[in-house]
Amino acid sequence: MDNSRFIKEHECPACGGSMVFDPEKGKLVCEYCGTEYEIKEEKKSEAPVEAPAEAEAETEAEAAAEAEAPKGPEIEGFDFTKFYESAELKTGDELPVYRCKSCGAEVIAAGEEASLTCPYCTNKIVLTDKMAGNIRPDGIIPFKIPKKELKAHLENFYKDKKLLPKDFFSSSKMDRVTGVYVPFWLFSGTLSGNFKFSCSNVSTKEENSYKVTTTKNYRVERAADVGFTDIPIDASDKLDDKLMDSVLPFDKEEIKDYSADYLAGYAADRFDVPGKQLQGRADGLMKRTVKGLVEASLAGQYTKVSPGSSSMNASDVKVRYVLFPVYVFSIKYGKKSYGFAVNGQSGKVVGQLPTDKKVSRMYFLTRFGIISAAIMAVSLISYFLGGAL
């Protein structure tokens, strides 16, 4: 199948060279002659979206995702699966073949990729059939941190990491850095709920040389009505969820209308996490957030708080599909690779680092010695002052 009609190549009108998006200039820049071009806004397709067939059989991947999804009652009035299915595009080929218009090579792209570099002529191409029609993103935050500044952000991240092996800087090696637009769903709406708690207050006082403990039990009910805006959940199963959660937040005030021009020179993924799986993650996040707020309102009022039954209802739920900029790479040290991610908007670095066991042990002993010495000093002062302290 020839999909070359879907390929959007950013060819410089001046010299015919390949153009890429420059984060510093916010423009398309030719890699050969340096000519700069403004980003052009794209209009959304008005083509109608076909609803998925009701009798369609569930795939093995969807069945597995449903089995892995958190169990328990879902939030009433909230069904993310409907949002997911309305954005889902049914295609016949899982690995479509694209023909590069520059060198004629046939390039195979993974089913969720939205942009790539031709492995033969290194031409930057964008696979627009993955970002068109009903799966076109609602917005995008362009890369703001250029790749050349990553080293400075990484070195700042290393500061005060006292447990790093002594030879880490001389022996570690950074793998190829990939700038990727990661798909996120942004949830907005209102969550109302009723919560029941078993609470108690315990007090102790002395009476006639006896200690009397009094316990008063209460049944407490709380009602909550919480609005939430643009709660982000990543929609790519290629990247670690914890890593993507850690690289947050992004300044959503800088979300721009989607344009394929921002993808030039970067990788981009289409959402690929099944809707039923995301339903559980979104449910859980909203539940924990509201429950935490309610429990915080009880803090300091009771000695002990035990959660009871609860019910929640979502209303006015809206979902946006956006792309956020993230640099991903690995640091190789010894026989292991440590995954890293950098927020392409703010420069925030997250990742794992190796620990030198000897340095860690010495650090612990030193800290323990300082604390012990401080306790001993206080005890001695108290002794010589006759226990005044």
Image (cartoon, grey):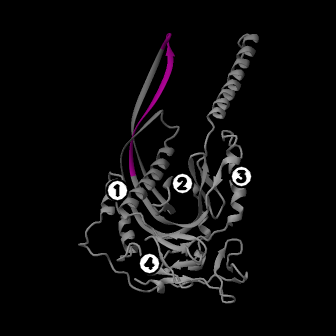
Residue where numbered disc 4 is placed: 97
Going by the numbered disc 1, the residue's amino acid type is Glu
Going by the numbered disc 4, the residue's amino acid type is Val
Q: How many C-alpha atoms fall within 10 Å of the one at disc 3: few (<14), some, or many (≥20)?
A: few
The location of residue 270, given as percent across then percent down, is 47, 70
Q: CA distance from mark 1 to mark 2?
A: 26 Å
Span colored in magenta? 194-210
Residue at x 75%, y 15% (from the top left corner): 381
User: Is 320 above or below relative to 297?
Assistant: below
Sequence-first tag of 3 and 1: 1
Identify the image quadrant of the N terminus: bottom left
User: Is 332 above or below relative to 8?
Assistant: above
Q: Which callout, 3 or 4, points to the residue nearer the camera?
A: 4
Secondary element type, mark 2 = helix
Residue where numbered disc 2 is placed: 243
Secondary element type, mark 4 = strand
